Image (cartoon, helix red, strand yellow):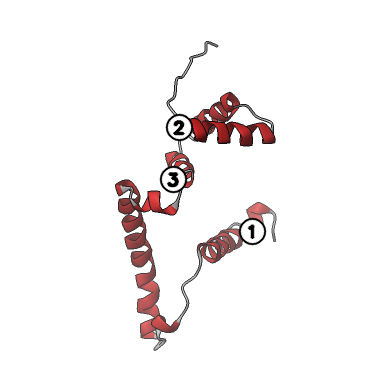
Amino acid sequence: MGSVQMNVRIDDALKASGDGVFSEIGITPTEAVRRLWGFANRNRTNRRVVAELMESLLDSDESRQGNEGYKRKRAEAEAWADAFQQPVRDCYAELGIDFSNLQPLTLEEQDMLLEGAYDEKHAEWLGLS
């Protein structure tokens, strides 16, 4: 297997600080880059995971807020979440329940509900019954 040399421009202070952190955790900057490329390679069929990691590596919330791609994705996610909740709102309205007084589910709670529904549906196959 061949190898390629990469040359990257990075602020001196940022490099020195990052090198110190990598040294403390026992990896070299080269190993850090290899791990990033390895992660991208392992997740090449699920690019969303790679994009989420890269978004999480931005310096701060302010830099994310200024990113047009982030703003567009955030708007799309909010529109999807609103569309996802509309059938629930309609059902509550039919039952006479005021949906606006209810606290929205957190992402963790939504994940738990979905996982529970999946487990319930596939309990026998998963060996849970």
Pointer 1: what residue? 123
Residue 44 placed where, x, y %? 46, 33
- Sequence-earlier tag: 3 or 2: 2
Name the amino acid type tagged 2: Asp
Q: Helix, strand or loop at disc 1?
A: helix
Q: Helix, strand or loop at disc 3?
A: helix
Pointer 3: what residue? 55
Query: Which of the pair 19/96 is nearer the observer?
Result: 19
Pointer 2: what residue? 11
- Sequence-earlier tag: 3 or 1: 3
Query: Which of the pair 76/88 is nearer the observer?
Result: 76
Residue 36 placed where, x, y %? 53, 32
> What's the distance in space between the residues labelled 1 and 2, CA to CA?
53 Å
Q: Residues within 10 Å of mark 2 (few under 14, many from 20)?
A: few
Name the amino acid type tagged 3: Glu
Name the amino acid type tagged 1: Ala
**Left or right: residue 7 compared with residue 120:** left
Q: Nearer the viewer, mark 3 or mark 1?
A: 3
Vertical arrangement, residue 5 with respect to residue 122, above or below: above
